[in-house]
């Protein structure tokens, strides 16, 4: 389905990004995987082969994004799909919030996607089926305790996508909102595996599908929305949460 496509994925070295890269590659694409974790990028190359091109990139730094775009232009001359997946988050108590907490979230979750779109627009315009896929979160639709900085940043991603539809005719832009998915983001937020399992155990009865999500669940939707089968889907925000937001009781 994606034979000869060129795809850029941020946060590609683990979790949703890694699974998405693997699925694109298995369907014929070449993936430029951007991440800050060079060790994990090396492991991804070993796992996915030579059609996974690793590039260390801090998406909060414009010059690194510009360098990433320049490399794609020099090597391929175009871009077909941009997946803004890089993310990070941590809990913040409102009365203890520091200015750094704001920048920790917004520079990666909001500034990063905006600058990536800025620098890749010329290359996307050279594609016959250009697509931008932004990864938001169901946190944008629900208020979790001490989670307001991450949640409001993810809300901004959703709004950003709507503006892209208006401002970039000819380039499709969609957003997905993953729910409870078992990825390394929880570890990076400082939770132990025991704490993560406790959280999953508490929310599981409230997920109508009866399980916590997997990176594969999210990647499946990313590939569909990026494909020609979704050529008339533009400005959509797709919740992928097993029904959690419509379940019996959030209770957390």
Image (cartoon, rainbow, N blue to C red):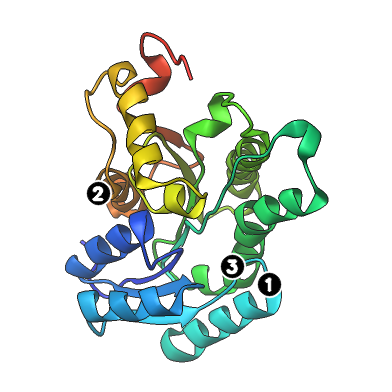
As drawn, the label of residue 216 is 2
Q: Which residue is mark 3?
A: 121
- Separation (CA) of disc 2 from disc 3: 28 Å
Out of 179 and 197, give the one closest to the viewer. Answer: 197
The answer to which image quadrant residue 158 occupies is top right
Out of 193 and 107, give the one closest to the viewer. Answer: 193
Relative to 74, is 85 above or below?
Answer: above
Q: Earlier in the sequence, mark 3 or mark 1?
A: 1
* Foreground tag (3 vs 1): 1
Q: Earlier in the sequence, mark 1 or mark 2?
A: 1
Out of 39 and 226, give the one closest to the viewer. Answer: 39
Q: Quadrant of the N terminus?
A: bottom left
Secondary structure state at the residue bearing disc 2? helix
As drawn, the label of residue 61 is 1
Mark 3 surroundings within 10 Å by alpha-carbon count, few (fewer than 14), some (14 through 19), many (20 or more): some
As drawn, the label of residue 209 is none
Residue 160 as seen in the image, left or right of residue 56: right
Q: Residue at x 27, y 47 (%)?
A: 229
Pinpoint residue 209: horizontal percent, then vertical percent: 23, 23
Mark 2 surroundings within 10 Å by alpha-carbon count, few (fewer than 14), some (14 through 19), many (20 or more): some
- Separation (CA) of disc 3 from disc 1: 18 Å
Query: In the orientation shown, which residue stands out farthest toward the top?
Result: 248
Pinpoint residue 5: horizontal percent, then vertical percent: 32, 71
Out of 34 and 116, give the one closest to the viewer. Answer: 34
Pinpoint residue 14: horizontal percent, then vertical percent: 36, 62
Mark 1 surroundings within 10 Å by alpha-carbon count, few (fewer than 14), some (14 through 19), many (20 or more): some
């Amino acid at each position: 389905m994606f034979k000869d496509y060129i795809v850029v994925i941020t946060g590609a070295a683990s979790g949703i990004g890694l699974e998405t890269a693997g699925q694109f590659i298995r369907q014929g694409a070449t993936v430029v995987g951007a991440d800050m974790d060079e060790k994990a990028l090396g492991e991804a190359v070993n796992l996915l082969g030579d059609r996974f091109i690793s590039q260390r990139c801090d998406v909060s730094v414009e010059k690194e994004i510009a360098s990433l775009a320049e490399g794609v232009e020099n090597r391929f001359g175009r871009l077909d799909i941009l997946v803004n997946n890089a993310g990070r988050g941590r809990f913040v108590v409102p009365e203890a919030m520091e200015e750094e907490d704001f920048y920790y979230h917004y520079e990666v979750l909001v500034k990063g996607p905006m600058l990536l779109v800025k620098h890749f627009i010329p290359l996307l315009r050279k594609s016959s089926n250009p697509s931008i896929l932004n990864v938001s979160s169901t946190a944008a639709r629900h208020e979790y305790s001490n989670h307001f900085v991450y949640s409001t940043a993810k809300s901004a991603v959703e709004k950003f996508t709507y503006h892209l539809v208006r401002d970039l005719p000819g380039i499709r832009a969609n957003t997905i909102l993953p729910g409870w998915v078992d990825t390394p983001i929880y570890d990076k937020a400082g939770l132990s595996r025991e704490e993560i399992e406790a959280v999953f155990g508490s929310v599981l009865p409230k997920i109508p599908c009866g399980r916590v999500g997997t990176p594969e669940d999210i990647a499946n939707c990313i590939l569909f929305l990026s494909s020609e089968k979704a050529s008339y889907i533009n400005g959509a925000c797709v919740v992928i949460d097993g029904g959690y937001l419509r379940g019996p009781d959030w209770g957390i």
